[in-house]
Image (cartoon, rainbow, N blue to C red):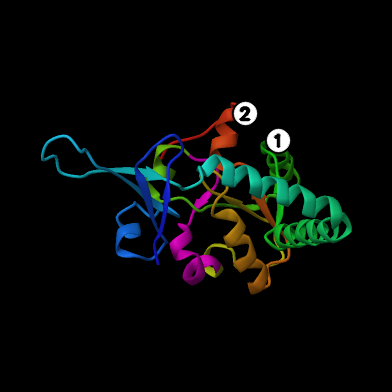
């Protein structure tokens, strides 16, 4: 149903249409489509329609949301703190399942002490452009079917290497589920290795 009123300091009637009406749908999804119909009494002029949007700005809506969020956190700080603690513990647990992260220098120390299997998970093309010496190329897509051929001794340390660390986490979880007991991941992948000015060799 429409409502009729008059604009301040104006003799022109204002006709308002609620959301859902045909006229309101033309108002670009605003909460209220307001039309001001001005009639000219001089001559045979046609009515003039003017549109005004009654929608609140997105900035106002965002500000109200943030105020309510801050109020909720202040009132329920124990609940929010408990939730954040659970999320952090879950994240830590998942990270440990994927294998401990090692810096480039820690990887070098491990190589000197225990001679681990260095498993490069990148595609063949990236591997050929530059890889850590003595690393074995096994693309992530082929991991499930060929890992036991490359690393048959599941008690031997395995260091997972990828481009930026994005695949080593998922690969670490797979290896742990297969029974590999010493799974490590190069933190930051080959990108971090290069940033530390560590050497690479080409095939």
Q: Left or right of 112: which side holds 34?
A: left
Q: Residue furthest top?
A: 197
Q: Is 34 left, or right, of 8 in this rendering?
A: left
Q: Position of residue 135 (x, y in %)?
A: 54, 47
Q: Mark 1 against mark 2, which lies toward the viewer?
A: 2
Judge by depth and name the residue closer to the eye, 70 or 149.
70
The residue where tag 1 is placed is 105
Q: Residue at x 59, y 35 (%)?
A: 193
168 displayed left or right of 125: right
Residue 58: give x, y in percent of width and height: 51, 44
Hey, which quadrant is residue 152 in on the image?
Answer: bottom right
Q: Is residue 190 magenta?
A: no
Residue 132 visible within the image: no
Residue located 51% across and 34% down the image:
200
Q: Position of residue 29 (x, y in %)?
A: 38, 55
Are the residues at dot 1 and dot 2 in contact (C-beta closer than 8 Å)?
A: yes
Element carrying mark 2 = loop
Can residue 65 be seen here? The reply is: yes
Q: Residue at x 12, y 36 (%)?
A: 43
Residue, disc 2: 196
In the displayed structure, does residue 7 sit left or right of residue 108? left
Secondary element type, mark 1: helix
């Amino acid at each position: 149903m429409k409502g009729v009123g008059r604009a301040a300091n104006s003799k022109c009637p204002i006709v308002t249409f609620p959301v859902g009406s045909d006229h309101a749908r033309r108002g670009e999804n605003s909460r209220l489509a307001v039309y001001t119909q001005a009639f000219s009494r001089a001559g045979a002029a046609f009515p003039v329609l003017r549109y005004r949007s009654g929608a609140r700005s997105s900035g106002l809506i965002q500000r109200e949301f943030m105020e309510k969020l801050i109020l909720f956190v202040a009132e329920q700080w124990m609940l929010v703190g408990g939730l954040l603690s659970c999320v952090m513990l879950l994240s830590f647990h998942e990270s440990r399942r994927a294998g401990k992260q090692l810096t480039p220098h820690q990887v070098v120390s491990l190589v000197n002490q225990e001679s681990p299997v260095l498993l490069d998970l990148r595609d063949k093309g990236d591997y050929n452009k530059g890889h850590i010496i003595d690393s074995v190329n096994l693309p992530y897509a082929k991991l499930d079917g060929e890992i036991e051929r490359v690393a048959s001794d599941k008690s031997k340390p395995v260091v997972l290497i990828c481009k930026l660390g994005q695949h080593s986490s998922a690969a670490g979880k797979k290896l742990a589920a297969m029974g590999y007991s010493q799974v490590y991941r190069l933190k930051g992948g080959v990108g971090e290795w290069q940033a530390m000015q560590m050497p690479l060799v080409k095939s």
